[in-house]
């Protein structure tokens, strides 16, 4: 089992969550543990409290994380040109093992079609 625990935001397909689980990751989708209309701040707090990396396509989480001043949770923001669950799943399955150590230390990772950018937390 992997060390990084994951919380996947509602804007990412359950199919992607299933792919992460099948690959051995401890992954939860927000709808499995919070109301579907839970505010972003509540989602971020749950990820921080449970030591989970939050994966999202919602740019609001970066701003909330910056305002909080926290060093956790780590955040992966996907800014891909597709929402295809297979493509997103493949991208995450390639990315997670590579950045696992950094994710345990508190980082914000932004992934787009051509690059991966990493910033340490807290964001200043």
Image (cartoon, grey):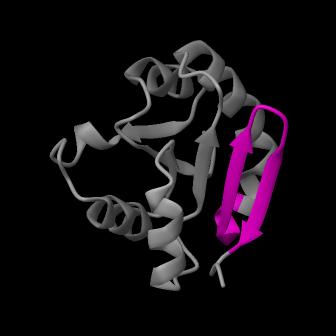
Look at the picture and state if 44 lies above or below 59.
below
Q: Residue at x 27, y 64 (%)?
A: 42
**Horizontal and vertical percent for residue 73?**
52, 66
Is 112 inside the magenta-drawn segment? yes
Is 93 inside the magenta-drawn segment? no
Q: Residue at x 62, y 81 (%)?
A: 122
Q: Quadrant of the C terminus?
A: bottom right
Q: Quadrant of the N terminus?
A: top right
**Horizontal and vertical percent for residue 106?**
65, 70
Q: Which residues are magenta?
A: 103-120
Q: Specify the quadrant of the image occupied by residue 74.
A: bottom right
Who is closer to the viewer here, 8 or 117? Answer: 117
**Horizontal and vertical percent for residue 53?**
53, 55
**Horizontal and vertical percent for residue 94?**
77, 30
Look at the picture and state if 14 lies above or below 55.
above
Who is closer to the viewer here, 112 or 105? Answer: 112
The residue positioned farthest toward the front in the image shown: 81
Q: Specify the quadrant of the image occupied by residue 103.
A: bottom right
Who is closer to the viewer here, 104 or 64? Answer: 64
């Amino acid at each position: 089992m992997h060390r990084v625990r994951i919380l996947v935001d509602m804007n990412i397909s359950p199919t992607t969550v299933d792919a992460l689980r099948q690959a051995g990751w401890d992954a939860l989708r927000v709808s499995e543990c919070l109301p579907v209309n839970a505010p972003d701040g509540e989602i971020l707090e749950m990820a921080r409290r449970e030591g989970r990396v939050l994966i999202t396509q919602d740019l609001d989480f970066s701003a909330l994380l910056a305002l909080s001043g926290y060093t956790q949770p780590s955040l992966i923001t996907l800014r891909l040109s597709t929402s295809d669950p297979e493509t997103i799943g493949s991208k995450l399955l390639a990315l997670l093992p590579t950045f696992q150590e950094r994710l345990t230390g508190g980082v914000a990772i932004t992934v787009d079609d051509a690059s991966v950018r990493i910033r340490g937390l807290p964001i200043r």
